[in-house]
Amino acid sequence: MPLKKSVDVKPASGKLGILMPGMGAVATTFIAGVIAIRKGIGKPIGSLTQMGHIRIGKRTDGNSPAIKDYVSLANLDDIVFGGWDIFTDNAYQAAMRAGVLDEHKHLNPIKAELEAIKPMTAVFEQKYVKKLTGPNVKTGTSKMHLAEQLMEDIKQFKATNGCDRLIAVWCGSTEVYRQPTEVHASLAAFEAGLRASHDDIAPSQMYAYACLKMGVPYANGAPNLSVDTPALLELARKQNLPVTGKDFKTGQTLMKTILAPGFKARMLGLAGWYSTNILGNRDGEVLDDPESFKSKEVSKLGVIDHILQPELYPDLYGNISHVVRINYYPPRGDNKEGWDNIDIFGWLGYPMQIKVDFLCRDSILAAPIVLDLALFMDFAHRAGMSGVQEWLSFYWKSPMTPEGLYPEHDLFIQLMKLKNTLRYTKGDELITHLGAEYYD
Ligand SMILES: NC(=O)c1ccc[n+]([C@@H]2O[C@H](COP(=O)([O-])OP(=O)(O)OC[C@H]3O[C@@H](n4cnc5c(N)ncnc54)[C@H](O)[C@@H]3O)[C@@H](O)[C@H]2O)c1
């Protein structure tokens, strides 16, 4: 990570700018939500940094402070928002278009603040997001030239808004599925590739590069590679910056990482897991392209195998049919419906079925994750933690890990890891749940 014990964390003084490439449903639900919460017209439900507590010491000590009082996190009043989009809509227009938050209850009371947040011109390449075209796009002589323009945007944003620190969270569309190639193998190859406008460098990678060059920690909310390449990880290490990703864990995958650990704990077998979704927002439209869907599918499919460890339990998990489908269905807007049919088996192999029908709201689940990631990444940066932040796996469908290390997907292991990381940075005892001390 590298993780530091009992570290002196620099104070969260001054303003924290949160920069989002992509100002669509998730970003505007997050921005409007934070502004509404500041004004007392809503509560930060779903946010661990705002609502969570952490136990310190023994169960008998009665010491469970709020996480935000235990570690130094930026205050919601000190946050400033910015971002880029290929459309010119300001945050009010984009939030209205996304149709997630209620116009009268949540958007109109903060209309002026939202209208003041206007997207900067984006770096975009159609072949990476086939279903969208927009007017608010930069032109440049090379991909390096485009990245330099992003760096200039970041500098200007910081100065204009008087920010002390910046954090970036990619909330842009899911780009088409790509594996890393030789241009991603090292920072030198990547920079040469930027100068030569190499085809394999995606727009999200230009944002990640620009942010890291400008000293801005980077989190990737989509499943495409973005910062998850050797070249950009090398840059993060060189700049001593934390990075994290990929793909916000919100609806159906959240359910999987809650249920699958339970089946495994009880040594119940799994024959198949069929997941299908209908959603009608712009994200759904983008994912209607098979190549963007492929990025999402890979991210969603990885979860079960890592949790169930078929290599250790071939009788229980050696032959699972795992299918994931996403269907674009406009009438639903952001209110996704995710169905799961789970075929499990028990004693002597007798089959049973579980059906889950999750009528969720995608961006309502994603917004608090954006907030937590921004605050925890800012904390990590002030605590001198750099490179891949595995303790933030809790938030991801496809957590980044160092090469050769499999990711932890079990939500409860992830939460324990997150809280123990916070305890470790404070120099407090880690909680192992052994409990032997109560019987001494
Ligand atoms: N909502 C969820 O529950 C959820 C969960 C996991 C991941 N995600 C991911 O988060 C991302 C955002 O989701 P959303 O629902 O807000 O989608 P959205 O379509 O509403 O917003 C994405 C925005 O990104 C913009 N964009 C695309 N390429 C860009 C570029 N190169 N530069 C700047 N802007 C660009 C689009 O114009 C759009 O406004 C998607 O990648 C999605 O897959 C969402």
Image (spheres, helix red, strand yellow):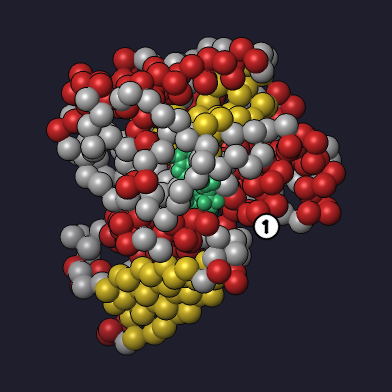
Task: From this view, report whether residue 36 is shown above or below residue 279.
Answer: above
**Residue at 73%, 38% in the rendered image:** 114
Q: Where is residue 231 in the image (x, y as percent from the top left)?
A: 25, 26
Corner quadrant of residue 142: top left
Q: Where is residue 190 in the image (x, y as percent from the top left)?
A: 23, 25
Corner quadrant of residue 306: bottom left
Q: Which amino acid is tagged 1?
A: Gly
Task: From this view, report whether residue 37 is shown above or below residue 207.
Answer: below
Q: Where is residue 117 in the image (x, y as percent from the top left)?
A: 68, 33
**Residue at 71%, 43% in the rendered image:** 92
Q: How many marks?
A: 1
**Residue at 21%, 21% in the rendered image:** 192
Residue matched to label 1: 99
Task: From this view, report whether residue 303 is shown above or below residue 422.
Answer: below
Can residue 185 be seen from the camera position used here? yes
Task: From this view, report whether residue 101 is shown above or below residue 68.
Answer: below
Which residue of the protein is positioned furthest toward the bottom in this rendering?
Answer: 350
**Residue at 34%, 86% in the rendered image:** 351
Circle 1 — which element? loop
